[in-house]
Image (cartoon, rainbow, N blue to C red):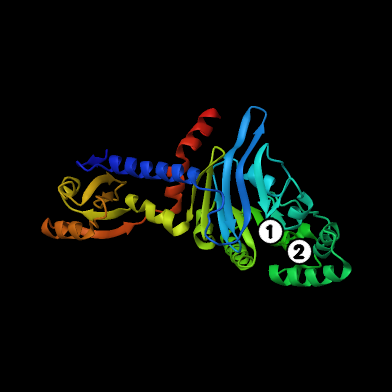
Amino acid sequence: MRNRVPASAVSKYEMFQAMMEEEKSQVSEVENQPDDGQEYTINVKGVTKNFGALIAVDNLSFAVRKGEIAGFLGPNGSGKTTTMRMLTSYYTPDRGSITINGVDTQENDLETRASIGYLPENNPLYEDMLVSEYLAFVAELRGLSKSERKENLDQTVEETGLQNVYHRPIHELSKGYHQRVGLAQAILHHPTILVLDEPTEGLDPNQRITIRDLIRNLGGERTVLLSTHVMQEVENTCQRVLVISQGNLVANSPVDELLQQAMELRSVYLEAEGNQIESGLATLDSISEVEPLESDGGRKRYRISMSGDVDARADIFHLAKKRDWILWELHEERPRLEDVFHSLTVGATESSESAN
């Protein structure tokens, strides 16, 4: 059982949940495009999409700046893929508007489609084609002239690192190279916006790093909307995070701001030997909760929540010295983006699971 002291971690967690709820309400009140003088290439305003009785996207509004890499997060069934398909004109909104580089997708979908490169989650490729044949086929579908095809193909192959497999059949390629081919078809026509749906799904750690670096390099001049379940990719790649839950936007902030909000949940990991460790820790005002973890022989392990902004490590060290405890490990565990994501979407996730 957890040992709670007056400033309980439960109330602390509730405070953090309340803070996240405030974040949600603030997001819902924000205008589609802030009046900050910056250029926004993606504008979604009051968009709703229904499938029969199911409301997949509900009055959704957000904007993405030119050259920004924005993470687009949400649990399964949150409306992410539906939103991306509306951005790319595969779906039409039932209400609201989407503008791409200032052009309404419903008024001129050919122009807006030409501005976007899209990598869908399953990355459909013609497996029997050579990489060179497939990309030439895509270039033709995009309406590129012969001179444009040659120039764009050369640049795209170099940009995505496909030189060594350019004349190989796609079905012989590794999963990592499949994704490179998918990215290549997305940027072949020199779009100003990339919409990437789970681009590292199914890749091994080394392949993830390679694709992550490639996406980072593709940003800058291009706007990138990146959907992923891998939070480390968001932290390492994105400047901003958009979180959608049950069709609503619940967060729209720079990554570091979201992590700063989660500092209320920071904790200390302690591994020690001695007598009455748990009861001793409960005497410290700088500690709000002591959670026993699985022990290893005589070594006892705890996750300790701290009160407010106080760092309890010095108090724990002095108490251990006073009581002759043997300290094996004492370090701070900072909250991760996963913790923030969970707090923003936990209700929706539980509802989805109970429905299943």
Amino acid identity at mark 1: Gln
Crowding around mark 2 (Cα neighbors within 10 Å: few <14, some 14 to 19, many 20+) is many
Q: Earlier in the sequence, mark 2 or mark 1?
A: 1
Q: Is residue 95 left or right of residue 19?
A: right
Residue ID at (52%, 61%)? 239
Marks 2 and 1: CB-CB under 8 Å? no
Q: Which mark is residue 188?
A: 2
Q: Which mark is residue 301?
A: none
Q: Is residue 329 left or right of residue 226?
A: left
- The foreground one among 203 and 307 is 307
Q: Quadrant of residue 191?
A: bottom right
- In the structure shown, which secondary structural element does the residue marked by tag 1 occupy? helix
Q: Is residue 121 visible?
A: no
Q: Is residue 352 left or right of residue 143?
A: left
- In the structure shown, which secondary structural element does the residue marked by tag 2 occupy? loop
Residue ID at (43%, 46%)? 23
Crowding around mark 1 (Cα neighbors within 10 Å: few <14, some 14 to 19, many 20+) is many
Q: Pointer 1: what residue?
A: 179
- The foreground one among 233 and 300 is 233
Residue 102, percent from left and from top: 68, 55
Residue 208, percent from left and from top: 59, 60
Amino acid identity at mark 2: Leu
Furthest-right residue in view? 146
Residue ID at (75%, 51%)? 124
Relative height, residue 353 to residue 114 (above, below): above
Q: Which quadrant holds the N terminus?
A: top left
Q: Which quadrant holds the C terminus?
A: top right
Relative height, residue 96 to residue 43 (above, below): above
Q: Is residue 101 left or right of residue 295?
A: right
Task: Count numbered badges in the picture.
Answer: 2
